[in-house]
Image (tube, helix red, strand yellow):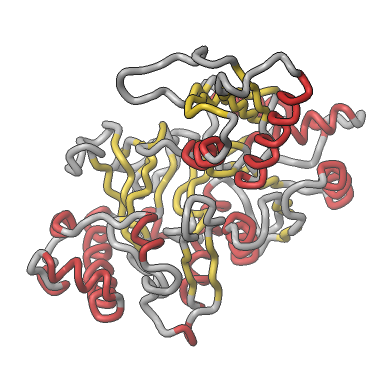
Amino acid sequence: MKYIVEYIDPELLYRLQLERLRDVALRLYQHVPYYRGAFDAIGMKPQDIKSLDDLQHLPLTDKETLRTNYPFGMFAVPMKQVKEIHASSGTTGKPTVVAYTEHDIRVWSEVMARSIYAVGGRDDDIIQNAYGYGLFTGGLGVHYGSLDLGATVVPISSGGSKRQLQLMQDFQTTILTCTPSYAIYLAEIAESEGIDPRKSSLRIGIHGAEPWSEEMRRQIEEKWDIKAYDIYGLSEIIGPGVAVECVGQDGLHIWADHFLPEVLDPKTGKPVPEGQDGMLVITTLTKEATPFLRYATKDIVSMTTGKCPHCGRTMPRISRIKGRTDDMLIIRGINVFPSQIESVLLSMEETEPHYQLVVTREGALDSLEVQVEVNEKFFSDEIRALEALTKRIKEEIESVLSISVNVKLVEPKTLARSEGKAKRVIDLRNI
């Protein structure tokens, strides 16, 4: 069996995690002023870490920490050792920047290869990688993992659906990697082109980068006649390959020899009992360029430990992502914050600060409608003026989000008011 560490005795795993935690804490203390300050603030040294529980004394790290230290303040190695840099789009402020040494890329390749192997991928597979390449970590992560596994990768990236289908037929692709919504959309395109997706050469789908439900899994598996698996990752930790389902499709195994997970009550910051929902927090145990202690993912999950009844792995399992502790939406693989839209609307004198975002799923693709009140001064029956305003708002929002939206102007004082926190988002996707 290639990745024997996935079946490690829990006691040995604990000792391995503790050894690696001490090492990464010492490196961070020595090389990253932010972490030196965090340790000093509580009167603690890395050498004081005697058990994994001692980690709980340290504060959480989050996106804001990375933005405050933009661009290279969280780097733990000299730039000469950095071989790859990735960054977020920065649409909500400064981008979050993460880096990789040669060692980090080897780790990334390995955990992604383990992920493909866990769902049944082997070195004779042809993997059509329809995740985007570039600063987004999805494409390159799958690419590195496919090569490490010894499989053949088709780096087609996202988009170009008819070409995707043509190459899938010509190359006899066996594994498709893309967002779940794109997998369904691609099947619909195939059917419209007279191609029966159930007769394709595909046997496995590996899907992530957006929330999806069991119903969506069922649709993908039916449309393509394949097994579809959920994968999890985030660039701050390493990229895709942090966790993946096994053939049991019953939770995602997190590769805990590299990523130490905690599940915390988002209100108290205290650990929640096993099986209870909380915020996933991850410490990177082996990353060199940008390691993080207690990175708050904001994703809500539950965690299960013990030997997996389906595959025998001893790595803990996290549930599907059940929500977020912040207001971020993921629409067609893009992170969308209502505050981004709000800033556009508030910059226009014709609109009121009352709006609502309605998210639906039309067929396989998510759709976002922005409903906004027009102020009384501007509101009129002049259709042309309202159409021009609609067009301008739509263009402004799309330039910020990089996805298409629908804009609906409504009369003044027609959106529901709240005495408490305004309900800005109505998510009707049933995920």
Residue lying at the far bottom of the rendered structure: 80
Can residue 246 be seen? no
Q: Quadrant of residue 20?
A: bottom left
Going by the image, does 270 lie left or right of 358? left
Q: Nearer the viewer, residue 406 or 270?
A: 406
Residue lying at the far left of the rendered structure: 43
Q: Nearer the viewer, residue 54 or 204?
A: 54
Q: Residue at x 53, y 44 (%)?
A: 335
Q: Residue at x 47, y 71 (%)?
A: 104
Q: Residue at x 48, y 77 (%)?
A: 101
Going by the image, does 1 lie left or right of 291? right
Looking at the image, residue 383 lies above or below residue 133: above
Residue lying at the far front of the rendered structure: 377
Looking at the image, residue 297 lies above or below residue 196: below
Can residue 159 be seen? yes
Q: Residue 416: image x %, image y %? A: 45, 14
Q: Residue 43: image x %, image y %? A: 7, 68
Q: Quadrant of residue 32?
A: bottom left
Q: Nearer the viewer, residue 64 or 243?
A: 64
Going by the image, does 38 lie left or right of 121? left
Q: Residue 406: image x %, image y %? A: 68, 28
The total number of labels drawn is: 0
Q: Residue at x 14, y 61 (%)?
A: 51
Residue lying at the far right of the rendered structure: 194
Q: Residue 270: image x %, image y %? A: 17, 42
Looking at the image, residue 323 lies above or below residue 209: above
